[in-house]
Amino acid sequence: MLACTSDATGPDGALERALAHARPNLVDRDASSPTKAAIATRVDARLSLTFVGSAGRHALAIERRIDRDKDRFRVSDARVYTSPAVADPKVEATARDRTETVFDGHALAWKRGDGQWIERDVLDGLAQRTLAEALGLGEFTRAAFTDYLRTQPLAAGGDHPDVLGGVRVTWTSVDLDPAVRPRALSEVELSALRDHDPTVARWIAATHRPTRIQAELATSDKGLVIAAKIIIEGETPSPEGMAKFTLELTQSVSSLPPEATFELPTDRLPESRERPWLMIEDVLGDALLPPYKATP
């Protein structure tokens, strides 16, 4: 989600200062956008996905926390993947990963696991994209299974407030439309959908057939998912035959606690730092071997 960014700003920030007078404001000021809440909010989201095949059980769990106050935010993303060990499928192997991003309204820093905090260039709108993508679990899940969904409006009140995090929302109850079937696609078509990020949701829709859907969604006037409680069960083809999957997603919004902070760590690597690889390219020039040269 956060790849290395350009070094074009230079050590003295001259380009950034010049662009500040020329570029459009990259912050979405629309209060109906989930990336711009009228009050400080905390979003907690948890997604768990289990897949049972002949070799054993696979499970992915994503726990995401988003604190935000106007332009500032902090995103923590923890992932745990459990699968049968290669040496002995009866033994479960677990891989853990964690990333954290903080934006103080002007600068953004990121780290992975116990690694070093690294400041990133935000000239191209990286901060706003990061927040929008972090809030996208509910929207992605709905997009992947939208053809299977049958919706009914829910009246506001009680457990269904009409405003969440400063955003006016509409609640709907969702269940499975049993008449929908996945469209038959060739292996070439499926591979093309799976291997490109913009079409992964379409690949899921074509390969994962729900047998049960139970959900409640709160969406903004632009149709974006603000809060959700989703359970989806179904079947999907695997090399050993049909496998079962279960997807559970809970996303909620609450007030920001007093201890929340958006200060960047002082020990971070600066955005204007020297990059060793750029120094190597500069020193070697044409002597750099072809496999190491960047392609245009």
Image: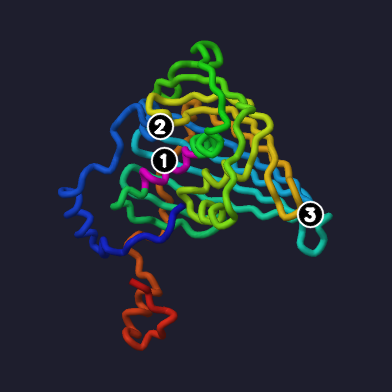
Across and down, in percent, residue 91 comes to 81, 55
- Identify the amino acid type marked 3: Ala
Q: Which residue is mark 2?
A: 34
Magenta stretch, residue numbers: 127-136
Question: What x and y, as percent, mark residue 260?
Answer: 47, 36
10 Å neighbourhood of mark 2: few (<14), some, or many (≥20)?
Answer: many
Q: Name which residue type carries label 1.
A: Ala
Q: CA distance from mark 2 to mark 3?
A: 41 Å
Residue type at mark 2? Pro
Distance between mark 2 and mark 1 Cα atoms: 8 Å
Q: Position of residue 13 (x, y in %)?
A: 24, 59
Q: From the viewer's perspective, is 166 left or right of 96?
A: left
User: Looking at the image, is mark 2 or mark 3 earlier in the sequence?
Assistant: 2
Tell me if residue 159 comes above or below residue 269 in the rendering.
Answer: above
Q: CA distance from mark 1 to mark 3?
A: 36 Å
Q: Secondary structure at mark 3?
A: loop
Q: Is residue 162 left or right of residue 274?
A: right
Q: Nearer the viewer, mark 1 or mark 3?
A: 3
Colour pattern? rainbow
Determine which residue is flagged by label 3. Answer: 55
Q: Nearer the viewer, mark 2 or mark 3?
A: 3
- Viewer-proximal residue, 264 or 131? 131
Is 132 left or right of 10, judged from the image as shown?
A: right
